[in-house]
Image (cartoon, rainbow, N blue to C red):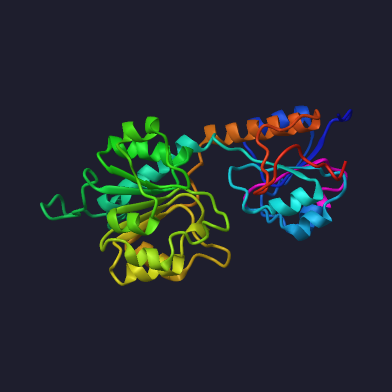
Amino acid sequence: MVSHKPHILVTRRLPETIEARMATLFETHVNEDDVNLTGDDIIGGLEGKDVLVSSITDRIDARLIARLPRSVRLIAQFGNGVDNIDIEAAWAAGVTVTNTPSVLTEDTADMAMVLMLALPRRLVEGTQMLVRDGVWAGWSPTSMLGHRLRGKALGIVGMGRIGTAVAQRAKAFGLNIHYFSRNRRPPGVETPLEATYWHDLDAMVEAVDIVSLHTPHTRETFHILSADRLRRMKKGSFVVNVSRPELLDEAALVDAIESGHLAGAALDVFENRHGINPRLLALAEANKVVLTAHMASATLEARIEMGETVIVNIRAFMDGHQPPHRVLPDGAHGAARNLRS
């Protein structure tokens, strides 16, 4: 139990309503410049603070965790993904980590469906043709021919909350649902979707027309859509990724599209540590790839719900309770060790 108002560092700007609410509940220090902070910036800003409110752009590795002031006992991630945080190092140091799951499900599934439509129906290309040229020759029976979605096979990698929400939308568009997941979904989920479960991912990617990635990034899922699996995919098929860039071997994807084996890809996430791959940009300019700016969860409603979830996690923790969205390393069970209290 803490008697004083908790002091928190927020590394990025949040919606105004969330910042205002945080300001009433906590001594809140926000990164007003809204640019990525370096490790030194984060450590300097945490002096005298109790909580770090991080985002996916912050690199919270073992070295940074070892440098945290002893007052910092909670990392409250603003986001569902936590692969930017060394969860094992935080656990070993007695630092609790929380995230904001569930609130992104519907918006992310909407974006996946939008991208699934954009690829075969050439939506971006059709818009750019009008905007770029400013002149339209008019309708023609053979102009801008794309491909129908109905009757195609969608392979979902990761049938959790988001994957299931994608499947529900895709079923309404007449797609046949196939999925690979760590655990098979119960009949109550499978039956309404008429979904086919595959225990072998290699076999599934060979059978479907679109592969959509919806699994978290872990050691086991790094490059789960590998060069070999991309080669196994049907000629003329598509890839959609609104999850994490690490799930996909991006260089192999570029090779597969350039060679003509794959028809294209729609990516809301992609490798950008050293700038976007020029070959990927060239494919986007050639309308073989649709790129969006990590927008899958970018609705005001989602961001506000994320902020409210962060607040709930902080208040529960500072009141001495288990935060409802605690993230534990694989194999960790039981109550948290708080070695820094």
Dividing the picture into quadrants, the one containing residue 151 is top left
- Residue 102 x %, y %: 54, 35
Q: Residue at x 59, y 47 (%)?
A: 81
Q: Which residues are magenta?
A: 44-56
Question: In the shown orientation, is residue 171 left or right of residue 243?
Answer: left
Give the residue furthest to the left: 141
Q: Nearer the viewer, residue 299 or 201?
A: 201
Quarter of the image where the C terminus is located: top right
State the image coordinates of residue 228 (x, y, percent, origin top left). 39, 68
Front one among 112 and 326: 326
Which residue is rendered at x = 30% and y = 63% of the image?
262
The image quarter containing residue 327 is top right
Where in the figure is residue 61, as x and y percent of width and height?
Answer: 72, 57
In the figure, is residue 129 to the left or right of 220? left
Q: Which residue does the image show at 28% across and 55% down from the upper left?
A: 207
Question: What kind of secondary structure does the magenta stretch mostly adopt?
Answer: loop
**Is residue 111 depicted above or below 66 in this figure?**
above
Q: Nearer the viewer, residue 90 or 293?
A: 90
**Can residue 290 be seen here?**
no
Instruction: Check if residue 82 falls in the magenta segment.
Output: no
